[in-house]
Amino acid sequence: MTVLAIDTATPYLVLGLPHAEGAWRLDRRHAEALFTHLEAFLQTHRVSLKAIRGIVVGQGPGSYTGVRIGVSAALGLGRALGVPVVGVDTLAGIALRYRGTVTPALSARSGRVYTATYRVPASQTPSAPHLEVVHPPHKTRLEALPFLEGCVVVDEPPSGRALAVWGRAQLQAGRRGVSVHYL
């Protein structure tokens, strides 16, 4: 099942397929560049829009406008292509780049961050990502991050490939819909 992942909740535009990913730092230019990058990304990886059977979108938390751009694009593409759309946690997409206890954080305004803590099994397979939520997504001051064992990563993009594979598993399990995380 070919699934396209889109995430615009961070300063990066992240696109993913189960076998490929790309991330471009656009800051606040997601809306003007998303479809140009998407077209080039699909051409580079020789995937046509007709081949896409589902769309997964990062539903935040993150930039309010960025999340809306990604969700709107995913829902519009899903409707146009007649394929299901499912939302996934952007912070979990960052955590899936690592193994062990991971605390991803995304800068918010006024010295605050969006953060969560996850445990990602070391024995994880790329075709079936899994993680355990230790602390769910929330907003806090940067200095209040829970520095547990493991790693803390700040302002990194999620893994487009992990989002696509995770989203594919969600779609195959019958999950649909987007529940945006505005914190």
Image (cartoon, rainbow, N blue to C red):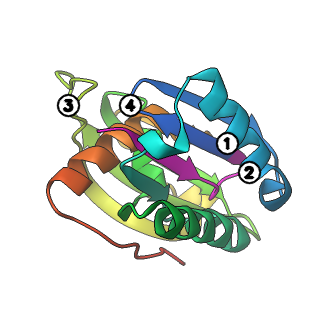
Give whichever of 41, 156 is nearer the camera. Answer: 41
Q: Pointer 2 and pointer 1: residues touching (CB < 8 Å)?
A: yes
Q: Nearer the observer, disc 1 or disc 3?
A: 1
Residue at the limit of the structure toward the front, as seen here: 50
Which segment is the magenta one?
A: 1-12
CB within 8 Å, label 1 to label 4: no
Name the amino acid type tagged 4: Pro
Residue under circle 4?
A: 18
Q: Is residue 10 magenta?
A: yes
Describe residue 121's horizontal placement relative to residue 160 as left or right. Answer: left
Circle 3 sits on which residue? 121
Contact? badges 4 and 3 (CB < 8 Å) = no
Residue at the spot of label 2: 34
Q: Nearer the viewer, mark 4 or mark 3?
A: 4
Q: Please tell me which of labels 4 and 3 falls first in the chain.
A: 4
Q: Where's the N terminus, which quadrant? A: top left
Q: Residue at x 35, y 73 (%)?
A: 177
Mark closer to the chain start, 1 or 3: 1
